[in-house]
Amino acid sequence: MTSSGKDRLDKLQTAFRDDIAKIAETCVKHEGGTQIEVRHINAAFEVLGRLAFNRQPWWKRPELVVGLGVGIVSLALQLPGYAGNLLGSLSAPYVLAVTVFSWLLIFFGVGIVVFGWVYARYLH
């Protein structure tokens, strides 16, 4: 990344932090919260900011890889119910196809979660 690109990214991150601090202060004042709650809100958005401004490719970002894997597994677990509702009464080949596809998605999703965990733990 060039120097000017780095400077722009730093300015954007600073503006993001300032805006989040203002939003947190406003929310807490409106809801009658405490300064501790402001710090919690700022910390949560700091994590989101780090994720948003991370310039690594998606496969080098374990939190995205694990989230993708969990999303695929949850989709696979919902698929048989949705297929039955969408297609009406299913014949045996359709039930078998949906079941096999669901298991493949679960296997793939768990593999992605394991990859993300191994990458974060040992390769990062």
Image (cartoon, rainbow, N blue to C red):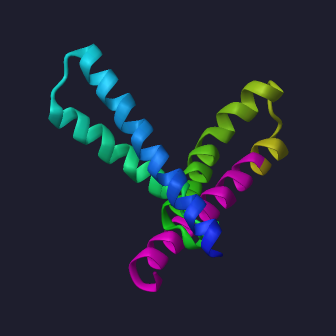
Q: Is residue 67 above or below residue 65?
A: above
Q: Residue furthest bottom?
A: 123
Q: Main secondary structure of the magenta part?
A: helix
Is residue 1 among what the camera can see? no
**In the rendered image, which quarter is residue 90 located in?**
top right
Q: Position of residue 28 (x, y in %)?
A: 26, 23
Q: Position of residue 41 (x, y in %)?
A: 31, 38
Number of labels in the image equals: 0
Identify the residue shown where x is 39% and y is 78%. Answer: 121
Between 95 and 73, the residue placed more toward the observer is: 73
Q: Position of residue 100 (x, y in %)?
A: 72, 55
Q: Is residue 84 above or below residue 93?
A: above
Is residue 21 among what the camera can see? yes
Q: Using residue 83 as the reference point, say whether residue 16 is left or right of it.
A: left
Q: Position of residue 20 (x, y in %)?
A: 40, 37
Identify the residue shown where x is 79% and y is 50%. Answer: 97
Q: Which residues are magenta?
A: 98-124
